[in-house]
Amino acid sequence: MQAKEPNNAKYIAFDNLRITTADYSITSYTIKHHQEQVDGSYKVVDADTVSESGKVGTPITADVKTYKKYIYDKSISTASGTLEEKKSLELNLKYRLDTDEDGVANFEDDDDDGDGYSDEVEKTEGSDPLDPDSIPLDTDGDKIPNSTDPDDDNDGISDEDEVVT
Ligand SMILES: [Ca+2]
Ligand SMILES: [Ca+2]
Ligand SMILES: [Ca+2]
Ligand SMILES: [Ca+2]
């Protein structure tokens, strides 16, 4: 009987130690911020690695950053996670390109550069859909390029009639 007690005591002590190392361990996490490029790919522009003695199970939520010409997209990001033992947590935040800063990201904006000419029209006309200074030839500035404007100078007489006159 007497021999068993120290054995039990040792077992309990060991068990407590095991629980302690499982609950607290040196753990780290990395937060990466990705910006969408013109070609649709993503580039990491900021990466913050945080090392701390964290408790396993601690939830981590990354702070969203603000970048000019970019909109954070929650649907394609992993902004939160949980610290796990001996495992480095990586959070990835993604930001969509918004060239004209109108709050509508390029991928769902019909006029990426906000110059009044749709991306489709600019591609057809050969002007740059990502440059507001690059616009189609449009004599009267009514946002209908000469090639498709029935009245280029907007004087009320159609081009057809003016040519004839
Ligand atoms: Ca936009
Ligand atoms: Ca445009
Ligand atoms: Ca343009
Ligand atoms: Ca026009």
Image: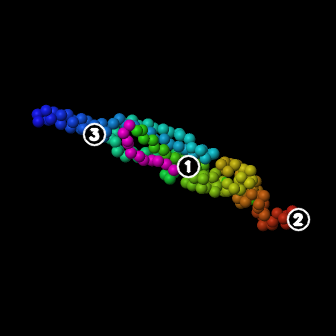
Which of the marked residues, 3 or 2, is nearer the chain's N terminus? Answer: 3
Q: Is residue 39 visible?
A: yes
Dominant secondary-structure state across the stretch colored magenta: loop
* Disc 3: which residue: 19
Residue 41 vs residue 65: left or right?
A: right
The outermost residue toward the right is 164
Q: Nearer the viewer, residue 149 or 83?
A: 83
Q: Nearer the viewer, mark 3 or mark 2?
A: 3
Q: Is residue 9 visible?
A: no
* Rendered view: 163 above or below 105: below
Quadrant where the N terminus is found in the figure: top left
Disc 2 on helix, strand or loop?
helix
Identify the amino acid type marked 3. Ile
* Mark 3–mark 2 distance (CA, rounded to whole Å): 94 Å
x and y percentages locating residue 24 in the rendered image: 31, 38
Residue 84 among magenta residues: yes
Which of the marked residues, 3 or 1, is nearer the chain's N terminus? Answer: 3
Identify the amino acid type marked 1. Arg
* Mark 3–mark 1 distance (CA, rounded to whole Å): 44 Å
Residue that appears at 52% across and 45% down? 67
Q: Which mark is residue 164?
A: 2
Q: Which mark is residue 96?
A: 1
Residue that appears at 80% across and 66% down? 157
Colour theme = rainbow
Q: Nearer the viewer, mark 3 or mark 1?
A: 3
